[in-house]
Amino acid sequence: MTGSPPRTLLLWCPDWPVLAAEIVDGVPATGPVAVLHANRVVACSERARAEGVRRGLRKREAQGRCPQLTVVEYDPGRDARAFEPVVAAVEELVAGVEVVRPGACAVAARGPGRYLGGEEAAAERIIEHVAQSCLVESQVGIADGVFAAGLAARAGRVVAPGGTPEFLAGLPVEALGRSALADLLRRLGVRSLGDFAALPAGDVLARFGFDGALAHRLAAGRDHRPLAVRQPPADLTVTADYDEPIDRVDAAAFAGRALAEQLHEGLAGHGLACTRLGIEAVTEHGQELHRVWRHDGLLTAAAIADRVRWQLDGWLSGSSGRTGARPARPTAGIIRLRLVPDGVIAQAGLQAGLWGETGEERERAHRALSRVQGILGPEAVVTAVLGGGRSPADQVRLVPWGDERLPARPGPAPLPGEAVARSGPAPSSGEAVARSGPASLSGEAVGRSGPASLSGEAVGRSGPASLSGEAVGRSGPASLSGEAVAGPGSASLSGEAVARPGSVPLSDEAVAPVALAGESSTSGGARAVGAGRPAARGMGGVPPWPGRLPAPAPAVVLPSPLAATVHDAAGEPVVISARLAVSAPPARLVVGTGRPAEIVGWVGPWPVDERWWAPAEARRRARFQVGLADGTALLLAVEAGQWLVEAIYD
């Protein structure tokens, strides 16, 4: 290739991984900081270099030289994200920017030099603009080719045209950035780039291969590679200004349809489709309105126009200031309307559902709910998302319609299978079926001579009512959520069995002297095969939420717990001590100012002591499950001496 390499201007930000850690993570770059990759230093701050820290040192040696060293793990994604504003600032002055790596970008020097009054003036202007826009210090080098410009930027030099070979000749071979090649060249007596460039090109290719031949060309100043400039993202936003303020819904709908068609045509010209649309409006009094619409499909021109019309209808038909569900109406008409494609994908990038998940009925429901949101706001239509938590209220998050359905907390690992209680061979389905038992309200089977089971699978012989558990052995108290209660012991919190009197487990794992692995034999001959300890604790990195309520979940979770009082058979209030001792068995429940209800079965207490290390956020309570005489099952909690009704079981 003949001719000299193109003149290149390269902007370099020293110690960029350290600066990126300060920008993103708040690590003070003014102190001794080192960025490590594979246990070796890849970048360090000026203060760390003053203490003797150098690139390539191992972590232990670097900390030995500087005991106050702050160590940060290398993150190329963090470096790239933090460098994007710098590139955008450079693009505000010049066009055709190539990102060499995070911390360095290059442009052709000819255009900025002619437009800004010379190469040195262009360099000073770019450095000043980046410092003012991003608060980042940088250096600029100008030379023939990207490689030489990068070395010139480290010295802050502007190499004269044609003087690049002379500039490179005095630099050591380590400047090539190839440690193995530089070590070999030094052992062969080649110590500078000038000595390396003086070698015959054919001999270099034969001895060092293609990579050595490329390094030889760079050392000689023959870097003819053109810049791989990035294409700045197209501005797909459409805006319309109106001389007469729009204060009627029909006029706003007409204006919005024209703007929606313009946006759709612009997206189609780039082969894109919109999945998330931002609608912005400015009133005559300067009031700014903004709303984002999401859609799980591709927004067509008609769909965009409908959403613009719904949103403008919601704004212009808002309330006149009186208290109500609708937001307040703007104080003046709209003079500017702007549509922003906040989320775009390739037009062929969405696969329609095979079995009609995105069919006509779903689209009609989505349109209706989206219109309600446009009138009343996005929080007017919400859907429930299940997540993690210890109480039913913590496990549910209400998400506005159209938003991503992500739980507020990661959910627990899947619970093992339901327990099965049987006094004989079980059917193939694994659910027990017993003979001659009374009616089961919601469970699968009731054992012989056992009382009614409200929601469990089976009740063993002569056992009291099971409200949500799988089995109750002979003479054991009520089990509301555990798998089995083996003998005359106290209630099971959520595990398999509790055999000794008065034993109260402190978490969602059972304390069962009879069987800790989830299998216990009751004295009535029934065999309970239960969940046991959570088999998938921590599976997939998901927290198990110890102390959470076991299945089944309550049917109704009250938005605000109801105050209640619980009395014993003598009419005295039931009190829970700090050591979780119940003063007397609960006998009657009064919710608010209602009539007393007889308690026929109960289990608890289940203690929960959350965030005890943060006094302002600490919460300590004990939970009970109780069954009433009318068949109702409730979840109660005691907090600061007050009984509360949190949920209702079906």
Image (cartoon, rainbow, N blue to C red):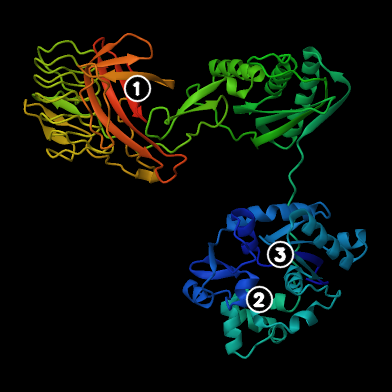
Query: Upstream in the sequence, badge 1 or badge 2?
Result: 2
Tell me the number on the disc at residue 13.
3
Give the residue pinned by disc 2: 176
User: Which amino acid, mark 1?
Assistant: Pro
The quadrant in which residue 432 appears is top left
* Mark 1 or 2: the one toward you: 1
Q: Is residue 355 above or below residue 223?
A: above
* Mark 3 or 2: the one toward you: 3
User: Is 272 or 455 nearer to us in this picture?
Assistant: 455
The quadrant in which residue 330 appears is top right
User: Is 645 or 582 nearer to us in this picture?
Assistant: 582
| Residue 268 can be seen, yes or no | no
User: Which amino acid, mark 3?
Assistant: Cys
Point out residue 70 in the picture as x, y percentages from the top left corner.
Answer: 54, 66
User: Is 158 or 191 nearer to us in this picture?
Assistant: 158
Which quadrant does the C terminus fall into? Answer: top left
Point out residue 634 in the picture as x, y percentages from the top left corner.
Answer: 31, 19
Q: Does 467 sit left or right of 462 as displayed?
A: right
Image point 66% across, 19% down: which residue? 374
* Mark 3 or 1: the one toward you: 1
Query: Upstream in the sequence, badge 3 or badge 1?
Result: 3
Number of numbered markers? 3
Image point 36% across, 9% down: which residue? 594
- How busy is the neighbourhood of tag 1: few (under 14 within 10 Å), some, or many (20 plus)? some
* Inter-mark Cα distance, 3 to 2: 19 Å
Q: Does 106 sit left or right of 632 as displayed?
A: right
Image point 68% across, 83% down: which residue? 172
Q: Do tag 1 and tag 2 residues touch (Cβ < 8 Å)?
A: no
Q: Is residue 115 above or below residue 31?
A: above
Q: Mark 2 falls on what kind of element? A: helix
Tell me the number on the disc at residue 554.
1
| Residue 583 can be seen, yes or no | yes
